[in-house]
């Protein structure tokens, strides 16, 4: 994954964790781990802005290389479940992304529920 793609995925993740207007400590730590995983420092958190909504996320997700879609979707699912809640706004965000890449949103909802239930 090239640097631009990593930055786009990071922005998508940041979007889903704040879409419900509640950045939980576990979500914030997830963002820091993700940045580190993608070779970005916490000083580079500015790459996460501007935060996108569900519509913008779908457009950005579609712009990702197809080879990255499943990895990025998995990260979004992890991010949506990390705080132990699946907010309606997070569901809408994930469903928007699913729609543009032809993934069944019911399967994604089940995956989130499985992660939340442990």
Image: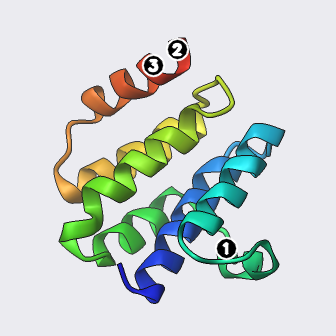
Q: Are marks 1 and 3 in contact (CB under 8 Å)?
A: no
Estimate the spatial distance between the alpha carbons at disc 2 and disc 1, rounded to whole Å. 28 Å
Secondary structure state at the residue bearing disc 3: helix
Above or below — where is 30 with respect to 63?
Answer: above
> Looking at the picture, how far across and down is residue 41, in whole percent?
72, 76
- Where, quadrant-wise, is the N terminus in this rendering? bottom left
Q: Which residue is under mark 2?
A: 118
Pick whichever of labels 1 and 3 is earlier in the sequence: 1
Tell me the residue that label 3 is attached to.
113
Within 10 angstroms of label 1, few (less than 14), some, or many (20 or more) residues?
some
Q: Is 107 located above or below residue 62 in the figure?
A: above
Element type at marker 2? loop
Q: Name the residue located 81 percent from the left edge and 79 percent from the top edge.
A: 43
Judged from this view, the residue extending furthest toward the top is 117
Q: Earlier in the sequence, mark 2 or mark 3?
A: 3
| Secondary structure beneath label 1 | helix
Q: Give residue 33's position: percent from left, percent from top.
A: 65, 56
Q: Badge 1 is on which residue?
A: 48
Q: Is residue 4 left or right of residue 36?
A: left
Give the image location of residue 67, x and y in percent: 19, 68
Q: Earlier in the sequence, mark 2 or mark 1?
A: 1
Answer yes or no: do the residues labelled 2 and 1 have beta carbons within 8 Å? no
Is the residue marked by circle 2 packed among few (<14), some (14-19), or many (20+) residues within 10 Å?
few
Q: Nearer the viewer, mark 2 or mark 1?
A: 2
Q: Is residue 68 left or right of residue 76?
A: left
Cα gap from disc 1 to disc 3, whole angstroms: 26 Å
- Against 24, is 107 above or below? above
Q: Residue at x 38, y 63 (%)?
A: 58
């Amino acid at each position: 994954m090239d640097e631009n793609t990593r930055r786009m995925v990071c922005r998508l993740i940041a979007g889903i964790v704040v879409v419900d207007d509640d950045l939980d400590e576990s979500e914030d730590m997830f963002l820091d781990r993700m940045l580190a995983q993608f070779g970005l420092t916490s000083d580079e958190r500015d790459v996460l802005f501007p935060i996108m909504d569900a519509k913008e996320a779908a457009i950005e997700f579609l712009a990702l290389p197809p080879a990255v879609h499943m990895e990025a979707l998995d990260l979004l699912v992890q991010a949506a479940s990390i705080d132990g809640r699946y907010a309606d706004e997070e569901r809408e965000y994930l469903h928007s992304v699913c729609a543009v890449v032809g993934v069944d949103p019911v399967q994604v909802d089940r995956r989130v529920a499985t992660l939340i239930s442990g």
